[in-house]
Amino acid sequence: MELKHIYNHIAQDFSNTRQKIRPEFKIILNEIAISPKRQLFIADIWCGDGRLFDFLKKHLENKQIYYTGLDFSSQLINIAKKRFSDANWIEDDMTNLYKHFPPLSQDIIIFLASFHHIRSQRQRLSILKQAYQILNYGGKVILINRNLRNSRYYKLLLKNILINFFTLRRNDINWVYVPWKKKERVFQRYYHIFHTKELRELLRSAGFEHLKQFFVDSKGKITTKRRGSRNLISIATKSI
């Protein structure tokens, strides 16, 4: 089943389990807060139910933010619209950023636990090139991707390696299907496992500079080590 249809099926359950403030929100907030601009245009790509907008609105009272949330799940967008009528919501895939954002129109673009769902390297580069074009000079792109190379996902990683070995495939093994259980059904969601070097090369190929990358654990503690961390965070700038 396509990922879009999976999230349409699980939208309400997914939203219900995403009520807590994630530690990564504060990292995003800090990157936005240090901007000298008083008015900021923010694009949240695959925004889910809009929970990041709710957090930013409450903590950026000294700035005027123009927020746009884009998601390919119609059900998640509907939840976001019902919860927050004071933001702009778009139902579409992240491969179509050009359709909705003019060049040089955004100050911050956020891919929060979304970019790792993209399957092909060609699409990943295309998306980042589009993000680069729609960013203002001096704008930032923030990517937060799951670190699945930890003990919690070892069984899934091993299963993928064995499948590739016994079927004589030469596919990229840096991915897993992470299950979501809903009653009697199990939905398998594709996740790509990024290495820091891979993301660095992608971002530079798209035109970005001044890249910084680090890992964070479940409590939001920043570390340079992958082991024991929950997410890989990459922040890059479109130079003036």
Image: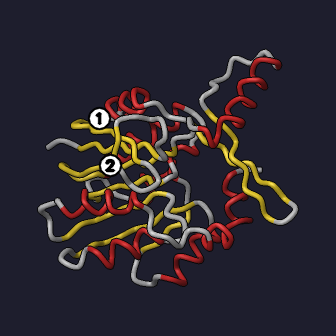
> As shown in the figure, which amino acid type bears the numbered disc 2?
Val
Q: Is residue 225 above or below residue 80?
A: above
Q: Is residue 38 above or below residue 2?
A: below
The x, y position of residue 14, in whole percent, is 64, 66
Q: Residues within 10 Å of mark 1 (few under 14, many from 20)?
A: some
Q: Secondary structure at mark 2?
A: strand
> As shown in the figure, which amino acid type bears the numbered disc 1?
Gly
Image position of 200 (left or right of 195): left
The residue that disc 2 covers is: 141
Instruction: Place residue 186 in its image quadrant.
Output: bottom right
Image position of 62 (left or right of 6): left
Quarter of the image where the C terminus is located:
top left
Q: Is residue 82 above or below residue 51?
A: below
Pick the residue in front: 116 or 136: 116
Residue at 35 percent of width and 41 percent of height: 223
Q: How far is mark 2 from mark 1, CA to CA?
A: 11 Å
The x, y position of residue 190, in whole percent, is 66, 43
Q: Are marks 2 and 1 in contact (CB under 8 Å)?
A: no
The residue that disc 1 covers is: 207
Pick the residue in front: 68 or 216: 216
Q: Residues within 10 Å of mark 2 (few under 14, many from 20)?
A: many
Image position of 174 (left or right of 131): right
**On residue 123, which mark appears?**
none
Image position of 30 (left or right of 111): left
Q: Secondary structure at mark 1?
A: loop
Residue at 35 percent of width and 70 percent of height: 67
Labels in figure, total: 2
